[in-house]
Image (cartoon, helix red, strand yellow):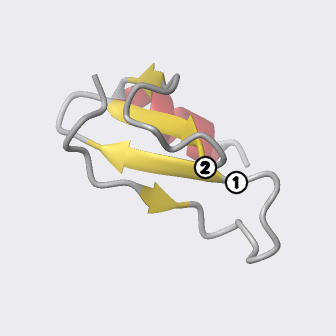
């Protein structure tokens, strides 16, 4: 599922750990995971680029 993706930590994440997200963008899917569970088999939330754009615009 998320094997081979290039993950990036949120720019809002601090170096203290805790509540961090990582994002991997593909042409048709945006993958989101908890940085405390980075295993390839861990759960991810998958959004369309349109849904991701609406989410990031609402902050």
Residue drawn at x 76%, y 73% as measured from the top left:
14
**Is 28 rendered above or below residue 22?**
above
The residue under label 1 is: 20
Q: Are marks 1 and 2 in contact (CB under 8 Å)?
A: yes
Nearest to the observer: residue 29 or residue 15: 15
Nearest to the observer: residue 21 or residue 56: 21
Q: Measured from the top left, where is residue 56 in percent x and y?
A: 59, 46
Nearest to the observer: residue 39 or residue 45: 39
Count the numbered circles shown: 2
- Side of 7 where 10 appears, left or right: right
Q: Quadrant of residue 5?
A: top left
Q: Measured from the top left, where is residue 21 in percent x and y?
A: 62, 49
Which residue is the extreme one toward the bottom?
A: 15
Mark 2 secondary-structure assignment? loop
How dense is the environment of label 1, judged by Cα within 10 Å: few (below 14), some, or many (20 and up)?
Answer: some
Q: Measured from the top left, where is residue 33 in percent x and y?
A: 54, 37
How dense is the environment of label 2, judged by Cα within 10 Å: few (below 14), some, or many (20 and up)?
Answer: some
- The tag earlier along the polypeptide, 1 or 2, is 1
- Side of 12 where 32 appears, left or right: left
Mark 1 secondary-structure assignment? loop
Q: Quadrant of residue 55?
A: top right
Find residue 29 and name its label: none
Residue drawn at x 45%, y 48% as measured from the top left:
23
Q: Measured from the top left, where is residue 19 in percent x and y?
A: 79, 51
Quarter occupied by the N terminus = top left
Residue drawn at x 51%, y 44% as measured from the top left:
38
Find residue 35 and name its label: 2
**Is 25 rendered above or below residue 48?**
below
Residue drawn at x 31%, y 31% as measured from the top left:
2
């Amino acid at each position: 599922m998320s094997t081979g993706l290039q993950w990036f930590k949120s720019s809002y994440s601090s170096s203290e750990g805790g509540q961090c997200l990582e994002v991997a963008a593909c042409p048709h899917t945006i993958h989101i995971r908890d940085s405390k569970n980075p295993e390839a088999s861990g759960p991810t939330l998958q959004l369309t680029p349109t849904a991701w754009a609406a989410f990031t615009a609402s902050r």
